[in-house]
Amino acid sequence: MVPTPKAQSLVRSIALSLVALALVALAVPAARAQAAAPEPLPADDGLRAAIVDSVTEALNKGYVFENVAKDIEKHLRSKLRDGDYDGLETIDAVARQLTTDVQEISNDRHMGVMYVSPERVEAATEEEEDDDLARKRRIEELRKSNFAFQKLEMLDGNVGYLKFNQFVDAPLSGPTATAAMNFLANSDAVIIDLRENGGGSPSLIQMITAYFLDESTHLNSFYTRDGDSLEQFWSYPYVPGPRMPDADLYVLTSSYTFSGAEEFSYNLKSLDRATLVGETTGGGAHPVRGELFPSLNVLVRVPYARAINPRTGTNWEGTGVEPHVAVPAAQALDTAHMLALEKMRENLTEDEDAARLDWAIEGIRAKLNPMELDAATLESYAGQYGPRRLWVENGTLHYQRDDGPVRVALPMADTLFRFDELGYFRLEVVLDEDGRPSKLVGHYDNGSTDESPRS
């Protein structure tokens, strides 16, 4: 049965997979990419063989590397013939094993097989749904997630920070993206966080990249096997609001960063326009489409094209995008922030700005290299210091001023402490000549101090 256009649209939604594979050329809301039904349908010998037939048919017809598709077919049919699939009692189990087997040959993480519940098959093949209503529902779902834009703020040192988890089609996400980019417009450095971004639409890649370039630039091309065609993708020639071609740019990556998010990172790296910080990305460079086989309750994800970067002549498929600065993903933001501040510091001459940057750099270094003080030292600091109080609880030093909030004091040095919630404030324990605490000194990022003698 050939899926209708409506069915194909939903098929693409289903194809945004159960194993956190990336969102590809047609980005859809995560709410549509649901897991398989909890009680999948049973599979017998005939059904298992039919599924293998359908998977190999779909890949032979559409996979971008025709010779690899033939190798996959040989591999699957050999395993079927040898009885390797005989113990798979449900369609879901068959689909999961076939995903493992096709990726073993192709090393293509976009490729896979999914179980699709009868309810979703019915929805995918239903011809009566109103197209306009379906679009409105999709837009409403995206709106409720703010089109995947999660966080936007200014960090110390006039460093802008943006985190978004999907490249939603620019015609839908454009106003939100424009607002975010205009917020960042006055930043001296910008950090874009793609550590949880699984990919999405080339159109948003083109749009956001344009803000960091002087002019429209060839970013990427897709070669499609069907029709032997090559399509180029350029950054937009116009963007609403000011561009930031001179902003110091950082992109945060993780092993989860995938597909379109990898393209964004790879494009900027090949242009020498950004510093990538974090982990090597997932390694998926092939746009994918889904082919649904309703009578079998399976969908095959078929990578039908491959990316070709105009500068490198290749892509990141199977290898991922390597960062310039390799650190665990959890440390990527602090590391990029510190790199940006250190670069600013090198170019500064004014003492006041230098002092503020030094303050921020010292704080980030302390976070990246945490130190510990022994329990006896912490206990010796406990006590009342005028309106300020220190005490030890569960091996951690706590601080409170008057009736204010209780905060954890994190050591930066033997007698100096910082607070995650108070970036502008640090606390020093001053020792007398006998090594006993005599007062607390509050230090502020503007250079001012205040003292509280021990009561």
Image (spheres, grey):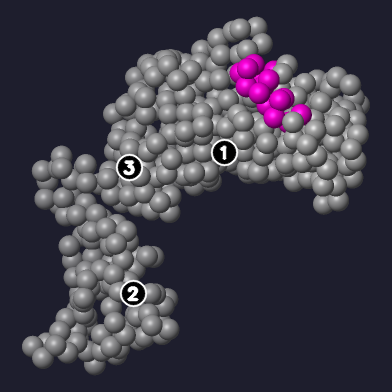
- Per the picture, the main secondary structure of the magenta-coloured stretch is helix
Write the start and end of the magenta stretch as one range: 62-77
User: Percent position (x, y) of residue 109?
Assistant: 60, 34
Ranked by sequence position, the earlier of labels 3 and 2 is 3
Q: Which residue is mark 3?
A: 325
In the picture, residue 184 is in which quadrant? top left
User: Percent position (x, y) of residue 6?
Assistant: 81, 24
- Looking at the rendered image, the disc whose residue lies closer to the viewer, 3 or 2, is 3
Q: Is residue 303 above or below residue 13?
A: above
Q: Is residue 297 above or below residue 130?
A: below
Residue drawn at (36%, 49%), measured in percent from left and top?
A: 327
The quadrant of the picture occupied by the N terminus is top right
In the picture, residue 29 is in which quadrant? top right
User: Percent position (x, y) of residue 207?
Assistant: 49, 24
Ranked by sequence position, the earlier of labels 3 and 1 is 1
Residue drawn at (72%, 18%), measured in percent from left and top?
A: 60
Q: Secondary structure at mark 2?
A: loop
Identity, as a three-letter code, of the amino acid under mark 1:
Gly
Residue drawn at (47%, 33%), measured in percent from left and top?
A: 319
Q: Which residue is mark 1?
A: 198
Q: Is residue 377 above or below residue 428?
A: below
Judge left or right: residue 41 versus residue 20.
Answer: right
Q: Which residue is mark 2?
A: 409
Are circles 1 and 2 on residues that touch, CB within 8 Å?
no
